[in-house]
Image (tube, rainbow, N blue to C red):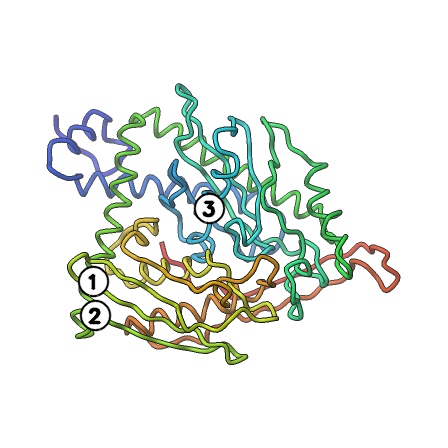
Amino acid sequence: MTCGGPTLSQATPECLHSTMTSQSGPDPIVLTLFANRFMSVAEAMGRSLRQTSISTNIKERLDFSCALFAPDGDLVANAPFIPIHLGSMSFAVKYQMQLHGKTLKDGDVLMTNSPHAGGSHLPDITIITPVFDTTTHEIIFFTASRGHHADIGGILPGSMPPTSVSIFEEGAEIDSFKIVDGGVFDQRGLYEYMIERPARYPGSSGCRNIRDVESDLKAQIAANYKGVQLLRAMVEEYGLKTVQENMYHIRANAENSVRNLLVDVAKRAGSNVLTAVDYLDDGTPIQLRVEIDEKRRSAMLDFEGTGCEVRGNLNAPISVVHSAVIYCMRAMLDVEIPLNAGCLVPLDVRIPKNSVLSPSRTAAVCGGNVLTSQRIVDVVLKAFHACAASQGCTNNLTFGTGGKNSDGVAVAGWGYYEASPMFGKVV
């Protein structure tokens, strides 16, 4: 049988399977076709989210990301959205898997934003949908979307207070909430998490514009379902075995690309040990030592020497650190591959506990996601001799009105937040 046609849709399942199994390794053409097919699913999710959202933050500023995940929670593919979302969403998916185990059922949708549960900062709310096989009823994929919501409560409108010293001052924190249970949207539960609970902390208000937030969350749910439909169509067309085989081949290809990069960097640098340090505006150091093992084609990235947790909000959760690292690895590759979990397999990332990069459960983090993350990128690229440092900042602006007044009475209002793109967009 001859495989003709330039696109995956024009190739028959039998043709693709025979091409893959007739050689010792995966066929590079078929692999590229499936990689683009997976990315097209994420792109379709993004288009759906943009078209159905109503907030300026998501609809116009495009502060959202959509991605596909393997049954084990590893990132499979994404479209060119916000890298800081994509690298950390895998932590969120795996956390929910550990929490809910096999209790998830078709029609369930999960909501989370806690940095402890794989989140970045609280305004970034992640919606996760399991994809079940229609025959075995086993989870075969996850679809997820993360969007920055302009206000989720806290001490100031916009939920990005420059003066916060505790995560409770930054708005609603949600470890896990089944926002859709068996196909039924839980509006009452949403209001409790977004309005009632944040307002219990002294000086803090609940969400100041719940109608916009609720509408955008429904847009995220719809975008995820779009991904579910497209993945099921792909499985029906080519078979689960072929689809998942290529999914793992794509991940292995990314892993091999990073391993080659590490060896090349060691040769160009003339050393297996690379070091770099940079500082936050308050003088807190971010220090990195990279040790490359050329035989194993792997590397250890050790942030020992980084400053301790700070009282303000420049603390960055470990998921954000991994986002910065995976972004840098992908940005340094001179090959066209999707950003996925394979990029991290050759890397052993070590982060000292209670540091600014691994803060305590109650530490304020809203600035760490948008400021410290940029400085981590600068340090990693500096260590690898990849490029000169940027300004290490995303130029944040927040304002609004409403919330609790001086008498403690909740007043209707709104919040607005804007920043330049985190890192830069990389497929």
**For residue 201, what is the image quadrant?**
bottom right
Q: Which mark is residue 293?
A: 1
Is disc 3 in contact with disc 2, using a CB cutoff of under 8 Å? Answer: no
Residue 42 located left or right of residue 26: right
Q: Residue at x 21, y 70 (%)?
A: 272
Against 243, residue 404 (above or below) is below
Badge 1 or badge 2: first in the primary sequence:
2
Q: Earlier in the sequence, mark 3 or mark 1?
A: 3
Q: Which residue is mark 3?
A: 66
Question: Counting other residues with Cα less than 10 Å from the Cα at mark 3, is it few (<14), some (14-19), or many (20 or more)?
Answer: many
Residue 10: x percent and y percent?
Answer: 25, 31
- Taking 360 as reference, is 89 above or below it? above
Is 177 placed left or right of 236 in the picture?
right
Disc 1 residue type (three-letter): Asp
Q: Is residue 45 above or below residue 80?
A: above
Give how far across and how far down residue 392 sits, in percent: 46, 73
Asked if labels 1 and 3 touch by Cβ distance under 8 angstroms, the answer is no
Above-or-below relation of 304 to 13: below
Pointer 2: what residue? 272
Contact, mark 1 vs mark 2 (Cβ under 8 Å): yes
